[in-house]
Amino acid sequence: MKFSDYFQVTKKERISDSVYRLVFRSPDITASAKPGQFVQIRTSHDYFPLWPRPFSIYDTDLNTGEFSIIFKIFGCGTSKLANLAENDKIHILGPLGNGFDLIEGDKPVIMAGGGVGIPPLYFLTARSIDKGYPAENITFISGAKTKKDHFDDGRLADLGINLVVCSDDGSYGKSGTVVDMLENELNDQKTVYACGPSGMLKKIDSLIKRKNTAGMLSLEALMPCGFGICSGCAIKTVPGDDRGSTDDNRDYHLKRVCLDGPVFKAGEVIWR
Amino acid sequence: MKFSDYFQVTKKERISDSVYRLVFRSPDITASAKPGQFVQIRTSHDYFPLWPRPFSIYDTDLNTGEFSIIFKIFGCGTSKLANLAENDKIHILGPLGNGFDLIEGDKPVIMAGGGVGIPPLYFLTARSIDKGYPAENITFISGAKTKKDHFDDGRLADLGINLVVCSDDGSYGKSGTVVDMLENELNDQKTVYACGPSGMLKKIDSLIKRKNTAGMLSLEALMPCGFGICSGCAIKTVPGDDRGSTDDNRDYHLKRVCLDGPVFKAGEVIWR
Amino acid sequence: MSVNLSVELAGLRLKNPVLTASGCFAYGEEASEIYDISRLGGIVTKSLTYLPREGHPPPKVRETDAGMLNAIGLSNVGIENFINEKLPFISKYDTACIVSIAGSTVDEYERLAVRLAEHENVDAIEVNISCPNVDEGGLEFGAHSRAAGEVIARIRKRFPRPVIAKLSPNVTDIKEIAKSVADSGADIISLINTLVGTSIDIEKRTFHLSNIYGGLSGPAVRPVALAMVYKVAQVVKIPIIGIGGISTTSDALEFLLAGASAIQVGTAMFIDPKAPLRIIDGLGNYLVKHKENNINDIIGKVGIDEF
Amino acid sequence: MSVNLSVELAGLRLKNPVLTASGCFAYGEEASEIYDISRLGGIVTKSLTYLPREGHPPPKVRETDAGMLNAIGLSNVGIENFINEKLPFISKYDTACIVSIAGSTVDEYERLAVRLAEHENVDAIEVNISCPNVDEGGLEFGAHSRAAGEVIARIRKRFPRPVIAKLSPNVTDIKEIAKSVADSGADIISLINTLVGTSIDIEKRTFHLSNIYGGLSGPAVRPVALAMVYKVAQVVKIPIIGIGGISTTSDALEFLLAGASAIQVGTAMFIDPKAPLRIIDGLGNYLVKHKENNINDIIGKVGIDEF
Ligand SMILES: Cc1cc2nc3c(=O)[nH]c(=O)nc-3n(C[C@H](O)[C@H](O)[C@H](O)COP(=O)(O)OP(=O)(O)OC[C@H]3O[C@@H](n4cnc5c(N)ncnc54)[C@H](O)[C@@H]3O)c2cc1C
Ligand SMILES: Cc1cc2nc3c(=O)[nH]c(=O)nc-3n(C[C@H](O)[C@H](O)[C@H](O)COP(=O)(O)OP(=O)(O)OC[C@H]3O[C@@H](n4cnc5c(N)ncnc54)[C@H](O)[C@@H]3O)c2cc1C
Ligand SMILES: Cc1cc2nc3c(=O)[nH]c(=O)nc-3n(C[C@H](O)[C@H](O)[C@H](O)COP(=O)(O)O)c2cc1C
Ligand SMILES: Cc1cc2nc3c(=O)[nH]c(=O)nc-3n(C[C@H](O)[C@H](O)[C@H](O)COP(=O)(O)O)c2cc1C
Ligand code: FES
Ligand code: FES
């Protein structure tokens, strides 16, 4: 079940120069939201922009029926989102996407989050710990280009995990990219959960291969609909043997990031 | 000379439910503005709405270099205008249109303003009095559909003129339309200055004819450009004898409300 | 006051005149997770080819001012998978099932029609003729009245229920194409498909779409679509389905007044999956407000003012 | 770093590639009250007919989503008034003067060209072929390659300086029309003119425009215009002027990259009369930012990515 309606902004919080946190009240979405899932938010009443915009669910509060997102001002849609005031109502569709399965057992894992990729990994981390996964087995790499657009609202530090903060220019935490940090931390005993820009994920995908371990990657894409009806967000994946003959026999199999993803297995995606 | 640039909102004032007053700082526009002239305001940064919107200049303050408009929330553009905050900058083009000549001598006149037509007539009245025209010779009919959208911010009452306030439903001032009031007040000794919706102006035009006196009418029209380049605002007027042969020999001569108007002589317009 | 929203187009009964446009509703499963799709007047499926298709590589879509470009390239599951996996699902719902078909040759169109004829629960076929005609060097079937008519005539012979010819707007004279498909036996005409467009990334200096060209849709194209619907309504007697930028009740009413007996919602589905439901409710409210009780009474009722 | 923005199209020298579009700048007087129009690469006048025209009755314009409809109906002062009253004014400014002409017959076009040939300060003629051809029952000259070619050929013989053929986008195959006018001697091709559209007042149940149909322009049509410019650039060798929804520097760059040697600003003039100036400055800044110094180096430089 997915919900499409106008929901109320119950809280607005500024995390850094261009990063905000918004809390919405929607018992339905909140109750069914899973880490790694996202919502489509219509950022304006007119057609600028035309499409709603996808944002990962950052956290949920089952008691209040509220869920939140953290977003960075990027262009036209996120700018309008930043102009929202508490109590405004806005059109949201969700929860969307496959999401992550909670982490079980006690095999060590590494979270690799770049900028807008951090919120879903925080959600996954927090819920997995709630369900009994040992916090100390989680290494969380939280990266950003520079201090002014980091996504850290302090909660990660409270999880008792092994937190590695970095920024490309060293203005916040260690100096280096998420991939640099992962390079040091990763070994074949650790499973990777990564979310961020395609460029970063592509590198991480091959890194996972090289270190021969497993991983789950959560992708970004332009999303006209967000729930699977337009095929606009499709990406190339390695065709399964099961695929029958096609009309245009392409060397790839298309999957929809919004519905078949946004979480894909390492090695599944054919990168550009 | 016309000025096209971003100007600052220096004051925002709410006059009634759906009516606001905005003050802008623009020494250039302020210095050259004439009663009956207007400005084109771009109400949004994107293309909703696409065209700027025309608003009569309500008043000017040569000392501060500020001018103001009074507007009623109508649709998409005026709604966005109402969301402006003091110190915001907005794109304005002006002053535009022919405007009125100040009233001279002491022959009695009647101002007939309906809703959005009141601001330019206030400006004309105030300036004419400044220049020595006897206030007591001015009858000013200020009408609105109903109380909640009247344009009266109290200034008219301070001019020492003979003020007649009315509303169609009687919820504000006398009960009746501007035309009803004019019917009673008008005689062949009085010149009419009217501004308001086309329907009202059409009636007033024939009333002026019937009472065989003179008058100036300030019209409204949809205005893509506001300064004469698109011909979009053209209205039918009685062709002068001077018109040479045309290709499509129409029985009308088109004039641009934005440049040849918005003020036209009574009897000049061919009404729909 | 109860109002009648049901319409009948050449025997195709719709509980209301609001359909979803091809390629903007997939095969119905996804939307059914948001609301009861039985409320829709009908569903038009993604265009089906005989074999499954992956379609064009990404990027496939781009936003434009009040519109969007798409170069999906007819990604679809193919007719057999549709009949086995998708059709049974749609058939569970009480809404008209209109199957869109697309071919590279007249034969492919014909084979598709033959397969669908066997299935009673396919209420109508919508023929997407905005496809490259392989036999004629990739020229669109919809670009020329002869080719367009030929496809329709062949399908008409093979499919016992209503055949809808969906026209391409990228033509010099839409009236000529409309007359041709009507003469060739089309029961209904739907229009418009997308306008050819493109956009360029000025930093990368490449096209945004892998296919260079895409189909423009959304509010931006509505005035063009409305003009074509009105033009076609002046020259054919068969019912018309209006498509193009319809996002609100007022948009839908413009098309009905211009002569469309039903409308399809495409791009607006992405902005608000419930857009069709809002339009259905809105049409009822409009009738009530105007003290009318039958949607059929307003179809084609636009007048020409005296100016 | 100083950058070169000047371009030359078939002998037509422009200090920068930014022109104003016909019908969106009248004859230059109004804009000259806002800024020094010498800064413009050039001016294209409102289309002139032989005799003055009042044009269609109001309402003539309507806003649409990110666009507008106009049915001005070629209101213009006529060729003689233009030559006597308007041309002398434009000639005072150091900017290219391009005169747009429109006829109801091939003869009218020819007579207009003859009159303008006499005036050295008319730098070029832009031939608006999106006009009803009275000899052929009102069909647009621009709708068919033969008629389009004929008009251009006749004008070409009579006018010694560059002849610009302005194409209508309401055609099935823009490449065919482009080739025809190029073969007929057009020195330059400009496109697009407006797309045919309409809109309806759902309360009054009448059309918003007295003429029923209007021409759609503005940001909404940009993707269609850009696609047509790129298509034409692939088939003709003569320079192209891009038109259609250009409002910002980035819009202008898309057209230059697609193969246009210059661009025209139309509807955007209404939103911001200084739009062309902002674009001229923006083009310079873009070059500086990309460490380039000549606008000619980016014309047609859009590449095709590997996907
Ligand atoms: C599943 C998913 C989850 C996301 N979660 C978050 C989140 O939790 N927090 C957050 O801040 N952001 C998140 N994003 C990214 C967010 O959706 C974009 O930043 C947003 O859509 C930008 O919209 P805009 O209108 O502000 O920018 P636009 O004006 O649309 O973008 C400006 C430019 O950036 C490009 N662009 C925009 N969005 C994308 C994209 N998604 N991929 C590639 N290029 C793009 C466009 O091509 C355009 O040229 C997520 C994206 C996806 C797909
Ligand atoms: C010379 C001039 C001076 C004006 N001065 C003032 C003023 O001082 N104060 C003030 O409040 N208003 C004034 N107006 C009217 C004002 O410009 C309109 O109210 C405004 O343009 C409405 O814009 P909108 O986007 O809010 O409404 P829209 O959404 O544009 O309009 C909604 C509907 O109203 C119709 N409409 C909008 N504007 C007009 C119009 N001008 N004529 C006819 N129909 C129209 C449209 O067709 C549309 O269907 C003036 C108009 C003119 C021409
Ligand atoms: C993403 C997308 C995919 C489409 N796929 C098809 C298709 O497979 N077959 C078809 O006939 N039309 C297809 N269309 C065209 C639509 O059905 C519709 O004709 C067009 O988009 C105009 O309507 P709209 O503006 O409401 O979207 C597609 C449109 C979009 C946006
Ligand atoms: C109000 C208006 C009047 C126009 N008049 C003419 C004209 O007389 N001759 C002509 O060739 N094009 C005319 N056009 C078309 C424009 O020159 C231009 O080709 C078209 O509007 C697309 O560009 P744009 O989107 O930048 O406006 C007119 C356009 C508008 C909006
Ligand atoms: S965004 Fe539409 S299918 Fe994924
Ligand atoms: S509004 Fe453009 S000429 Fe008057």
Image: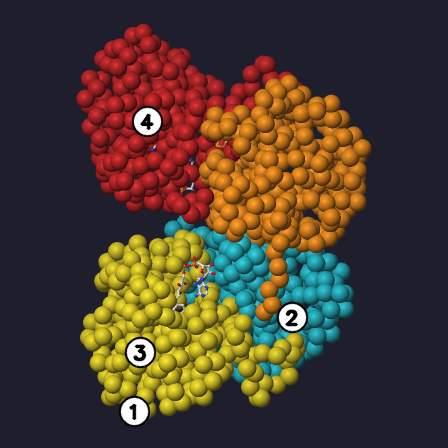
Chain colours: A red, B yellow, C orange, D cyan
From the viewer's perspective, is A208 left or right of C135? left
Quadrant into which the N terminus of chain A falls: top left
Q: Position of residue D24 (x, y in %)?
A: 51, 67
Q: Is disc 1 in contact with disc 3, using a CB cutoff of under 8 Å?
A: no
Dot 2: chain letter: D
User: In this rendering, which labeled residue sits more in front, label 1 or label 3?
Assistant: 3
Q: Which residue is mark 3?
A: B140
Furthest-top residue in view? A105
Nearest-to-viewer mark from 2 and 4: 4
SS for callout 4: helix
* Beta carbon at label 2 within 8 Å of ligand 4: yes
Q: Give the image location of residue A109, x and y in percent.
A: 31, 14
Q: Using the image, name the chain to which the residue with label 1 belongs.
A: B
The Cα–Cα distance between marks 1 and 2, rounded to whole angstroms, is 52 Å
Nearest to the eye among marks 3 and 4: give it: 3
Q: Are marks 1 and 3 on the same chain?
A: yes
Label 2 and label 3: CA atoms lie apart by 49 Å
> Badge 2 is on which residue?
D102
Identify residue type, mark 3.
Answer: Phe
Identify which amino acid the numbered label 1 is placed on: Asp
Q: Quadrant of residue A254?
A: top right
Identify the residue at horizontal 58%, vertical 88% (top origin): B241
- Spatial distance from mark 3 to mark 4, Cα to Cα? 58 Å
- In the image, taking residue D173 as reference, residue D248 lies left or right, namely left
Looking at the rendered structure, the secondary structure element under dot 3 is strand
Residue at image mark 4: A27
Element on which disc 2 rests: loop
Residue B190, above or below B5? below
